[in-house]
Every structure is written in C-alpha cells, then in structure tokens.
Amino acid sequence: MRAAPWRWRQFAGANPPPEPDMRNPSPLLTGLGLSPILIVLASCIAPALAATEPGADAPNTAAAVALAPRIEMDGAAEQGALLRGRIIPATGSLTRDGESVAVASDGSFLLGFDRDASGSVTLRLDPGNGALPVERRLDIAAHSWALQHINAPMRGAARSDADFAARRPGEIAQMAAARRTVVTSDGWRQQFIWPLRGRISGVFGSQRIYQGTPGSFHNGVDVAAPTGTPYVAPADGVVILAATTPFTLEGYLLMIDHGMGLSSVFLHSNRLVVHTGDVVRQGQYLGDVGATGRVTGPHLHWAMRWHGAKIDAARLPGPMTR
Ligand SMILES: [Zn+2]
C-alpha cells in the first residue's frame, strides 16, 4: 500500500480528532466490499449498537480494519530535515531505534534529523491490544556542506580570550537550563512562517572559518536586515530564555519552545520585547534585528532543534517570497 498523501495542515489547531484516511482504504478493507462511507458510518454507530446489541460485532470489525496499524510520514529522511508523521492507532506507542518518541493524542509526532545524522533509523509502532508491531526503516540522505569564511574573531564580542573564558561557562549554563524547561505549546503543529523577510546571508550546515580558525558548523539561517528591523514569532510558543544582557557569541539571545521537543533560537538582536516565561503567538513582534555578539553585520540568525538534533529552520516556512 502506498503512503497516504495526507497533509499536515489538516491537523493544525488544538487536538483535532484523528481521521482514518478514506482516500486510501486498505486492500483488506476493499476486499470486504465496504465503501469508505459505510466504514465511517459503522465507526459512528458502533458504540450505540454495542450498548443495545452486545452480539452485533460486524460494525466493530469494520472499524478495526479501518484502523489497521500503520506509520504515516510526510517527507523523506534527510540531514537537517524535520518530518511530520502520524501513527494509527493514535493510542499506540512509537520508538526510534529503541528510544521512545513522543506522540500527541491524535497520533501526530515529529522526527528530526541532525545535520550530521547518517545511516538509517527504524521506527517501530506497537499498536497495543496484542496486535503485531509495525516497523518502518528510513534511510537518511546525506548533504555536502559548503565552507563559509567569516571575518570575525572566534571569541565574538568578548574583549579577550580570557574575558571569553570567564563569561562563556555562565552563558552555556543559562542556555542549558532553558532547554530543561518544560512547557506546553501546540506551536509545533502550525505551518511556520518566516520571522523576517530579507536577503539570506547564511545557510544552515556550512562549515565556518573565523579569521582562519575552523569553528563549528552554522546551525541556522541568517536573514540580513538593518538594525532595528522588527521580527516576529514563526509559530506559537513559550519564551524559555530572553537574554537581559548580550551573550559573547549570541548577543541578545531569544529561545522559544514550540512544544513536542521543537524549539527556535534567535540571535544578535538589538533588543527583545518579550521576556522569559511569555507565551507568544505566531506573528507576534518579538524584537529587533541587531549586530550583537559574533557578527560581521546586522542580521537575524534563526536556528531550530528537535530535542538535541540541529535541523534547518529554513525548511519549515518553505521558500521566502519577498
Ligand atoms: Zn547565523
């Protein structure tokens, strides 16, 4: 059976009910000669029949077939990609290479692939109720990443290497503590928007060389804009860290948790207008573009993670139209 072409946007909003995909009834369902409409009707009336006629098991059998266990995925596994998926039944449990994957009440889940992910991952759905597990292997497509030379010192805005060494551990501790914050948000379900439109001056994944010294890879997308240009939230979320003083590398740093392990980070702002703990909505004004931290000019750096995996933020809103 080919993968059902369901679209994620159908599931935007708070806890939509799970819907069997009636455009692609399973071969078994078709073999029973039951139309999708009848299956829906059977699903709806089954509880009523069960209450009055305990012996009438045909509608319940049909409903069970419509819920044949499966893992649906939207998109292909690729370094830096975030995939959206759904399990049926929604009450099943899902693992990735043996590790538990969080699943929403409607069966939706996210799966991110780090920039350096390789090989393959195996998803395993345990439908429960004694049904056989379903497995799906995803081979991760690799990218070749470019080099980018940056005319800025490795230590960013620190006055000296000693100043950097003194300040950096505290900054890292603040970011790590923010990532341990537990919040509730359905922002991850939304179709993300660009926080800012402008020239893309840096792409995800490139290996960076700072004045001749190799640094880590670039984990976000850079959008160049004059200092003071406002930017907005790409999706709903909760502010888990809004720096009140500029960090050495990140400058005025803003971290937003969108729920389900998905988070955004915005760097180098000139100022932030939200505070740690604020609930923000998609499109809400967050702050102004700046040139604080390790930069060569004013821009917004937007990075995203799914749990520990660094993913390419630019893939979420899709191509930018200016
Ligand atoms: Zn950047």
Image (cartoon, rainbow, N blue to C red):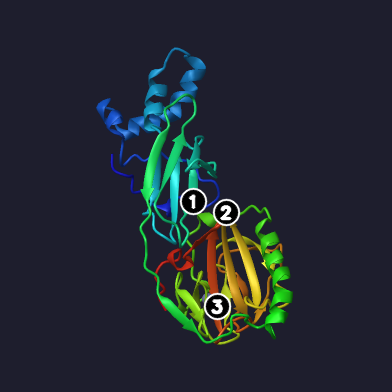
Badge 3 density bin: few <14, some 14–19, many ≥20, Cα 10 Å: many
Asked whether the viewer can see residue 115, the reply is yes
Quadrant housing the C terminus: bottom left
Q: x, y percentage for residue 8? A: 43, 53
Return the residue at label 2. 261
Badge 2 density bin: few <14, some 14–19, many ≥20, Cα 10 Å: some
Q: Earlier in the sequence, mark 2 or mark 3?
A: 2
Residue found at x 37% / y 61%: 142
Q: Amino acid at mark 1?
A: Leu
Residue found at x 57% / y 54%: 261
Asked whether the viewer can see residue 88, the reply is no
Badge 1 density bin: few <14, some 14–19, many ≥20, Cα 10 Å: many
User: In what element is the residue under mark 1?
Assistant: strand
Q: Earlier in the sequence, mark 1 or mark 2?
A: 1
Return the residue at label 1. 110
User: In what element is the residue under mark 2?
Assistant: loop
Position above or below: 149 against 66: below
Q: Which mark is residue 300?
A: 3
Left or right of 49? Residue 162 is right
Does the numbered disc 3 mark a residue whose Cβ is under 8 Å from ligand 1?
no
